[in-house]
Image (cartoon, rainbow, N blue to C red):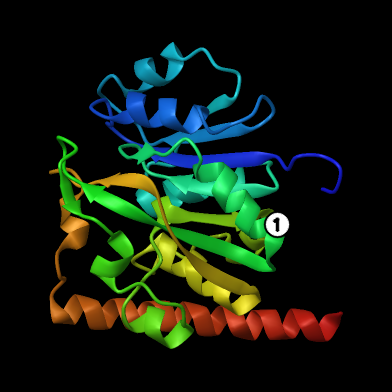
Amino acid sequence: MEGKAPKISVAMASYNGENYIYEQIKTILNNLKKNDELIISDDGSTDKTIDIINSFKDERIKLLNGPRIGIKQNFANAIKNTTGDFIFLTDQDDIWENNKVEKIIQCFEKNDYILIQHDAIVIDENENIMFESFASHRNVKIGIIKNIIKNSYHGCCIAFKKELKEEFLPIPNDIYLHDQWIGLIGEVNGKTYFLDEKLMKYRRHGGNASSFKHLPIRQIIKNRLSISKELMKYLIKRKRNQKKL
């Protein structure tokens, strides 16, 4: 990539996002250059989401039909179709700062990281501040065991190098969180880093507020066992592939 700017891909999973998706797409496009791309996998929206996306008439936006089997595989579909050197994940209802991509790419280029997660301000549906720092509220930290027990990786704040997607795709169906899977595979394959800069407003509202609630203990245990099992399977496969080289 020396001598030319890296290509940026943004992967979005959309579904019935008419209330906020216009503002989100607008702030994403403000971060992108002419040759960058926004890949949107829509999982069968029945509201005005598709009309809003098409209204931009921007060649950088590529709209795909999602697999319609849930958010994990909808994100996987968007990520699979990216062609950039660096891939950013995004929800359909947040607000990016205008320097988000610039700050993240600068951090990648100055360091040997494979995945970066930044901080965010948490807002409600009317843009009132709920928490000044998502990272502080969720006690965000690096570490495989730590992130199996309690996940710190949050997709809308994540960016990674293109080579990582070949490691974490396909995303296992049995795991609970796609971003936890991506973060853990990032830790196995290189350095991950939490950037202490608030580069986005992360919107909490009726349609997504459940992710801030505690799950029943039985579900928590099941999720930990599932992610541990899939990670072990990945590590065994990875070791076998390394022996063949």
Picture coordinates of residue 207 (x, y %)?
A: 18, 43
Is residue 220 visible in the rendered image? The answer is yes
Picture coordinates of residue 164 (x, y %)?
A: 64, 62
Residue at the disc numbered 1 = 109
Q: Residue at x 60, y 83 (%)?
A: 235
Residue 82's quadrant in the figure? Answer: top right
The amino acid type of the residue labelled 1 equals Glu
Q: Residue at x 50, y 28 (%)?
A: 30
Picture coordinates of residue 134 (x, y %)?
A: 29, 60
The front one of 188 and 1 is: 1
Total marks shown come to 1
Asked if 233 appears above or below 132 in the picture, the reply is below
Q: Residue at x 60, y 40 (%)?
A: 9
The front one of 17 and 200 is: 200
The front one of 50 and 87 is: 87
Is residue 64 visible in the rendered image? The answer is no
